Image (cartoon, coloured by chain):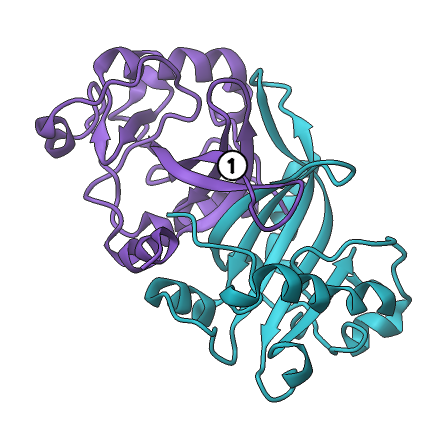
Chain colours: A cyan, B purple
Amino acid sequence: MKASEQAATAWRRSGTRGFCVALACAGALLPLGPSAAEDGSPIFGVHIPDGYRHWELIAPSHETGEFNELRGILGNPIAVRAYEEGRLPFPDGTILVKLAWKREPSSEFSGAFVPGRPTTVQLMVKDARRYADTGGWGFGRFIAGRAVDRAQHEACFPCHQASVRDHDYVFTRFAP
Amino acid sequence: MKASEQAATAWRRSGTRGFCVALACAGALLPLGPSAAEDGSPIFGVHIPDGYRHWELIAPSHETGEFNELRGILGNPIAVRAYEEGRLPFPDGTILVKLAWKREPSSEFSGAFVPGRPTTVQLMVKDARRYADTGGWGFGRFIAGRAVDRAQHEACFPCHQASVRDHDYVFTRFAP
């Protein structure tokens, strides 16, 4: 069975529990131990939600430099409806998940680049009361299903705040 | 209302009727007249299906060169199940739709590229009997909702045949 097929059959099993997002958090890439996965992300307690891989596409993106990644930002139904209605701020219950893969040249079509190995899963979860100190958003950054360290999570909101405050701290726009 | 918001509110209205795909057809970019949209794509009679924008993401991609596009390949539920099961050939009723946007630098995050204006919508529709001469696939390539010319559609299958015959003529692999 090829890797792509294994990935496909594992698809339904993808996602662990809970939720979490950090669109554009950089930093060291040291995953935490198993307890982090159980407790969710540091600071925010965000988990990877069940079934997220089946959510609708909000937009793809391409991160250059050392990342060299293709990304797909998906949204849960609450997120999708908010984008449809052009609603800001996003309502409580909104979850955005950014999937990232290494960007690799297609071996089959010259000039095209396609997803290679998956790198991170990053989430933003809206709960205006719970996350009042960070614009109403809880963040989570996961590598191989495990949340990364506290320092990386501390970097999430300041970047979103500095860059996209006027879009309720969300970078991603809907791609029609 | 910003362009992105207009796009969001127009989301539900997206899609015309019917279906169609050409993953990786290049050529001249002259759209046909309104009759082409009504009749579907030349040769194949494929239409853009209702609700396609809500389908699940199979994978993003990046096309370099003159195209300079980000792309998102979505699949209908039959396609999604086939990918999940690693099933080849894809069953009748499979529809894949490739959405393409100009790739533009983000004005908000250095080093990131995001979707700009939409360029084409391309479809592949599986019907082994109807499209027996082209590997069981009907193709359609649309610009602003109108199918492009016959010559471009004639180029679809030969390229898919030459490059991805062993993957039932489909370039896109599932990105986990």
Q: Residue at x 20, y 44 (%)?
A: B16
Nearest the viewer among B129 and B115 is B115
Q: Position of residue A144 (x, y in %)?
A: 79, 55
Observer able to see residue A1: no
Disc tally is 1
Asked if residue A111 is positioned above or below residue A36 in the image, the reply reads above
Q: Position of residue B116 (x, y in %)?
A: 44, 40
Q: Quadrant of residue B150?
A: top left
Residue at 44%, 68% (x, y): give it: A77
Give the secondary structure at mark 1.
Answer: strand
Task: Pick out the residue farthest to the bottom.
Answer: A129
**Is residue A85 placed above or below B43 in the rendered structure?**
below
- In the picture, measured across the screen, residue B97 lies left or right of residue B149, that is right
Name the foreground residue: A63 vs A4: A63
The quarter of the rendered structure image containing the N terminus of chain A is top right
Residue B130, image x, y percentages:
24, 26
Q: Position of residue B46 (x, y in %)?
A: 23, 31
Q: Measuring 21% from the left and 18% from the top, which residue is drawn there? A: B43
Vertical arrangement, residue A141 with respect to residue A73, above or below: below
Q: Residue A81 falls in which quadrant of the image?
A: bottom left
| Residue at horizontal 24 percent and vertical 18 percent from the top | B30
Give the labeled residue for mark 1.
B104
Amino acid type at image mark 1: Glu
Determine whether, in the image, residue A59 is placed left or right of residue B34. right
Q: Is residue A5 visible?
A: yes
A67 left or right of B155 in image? right
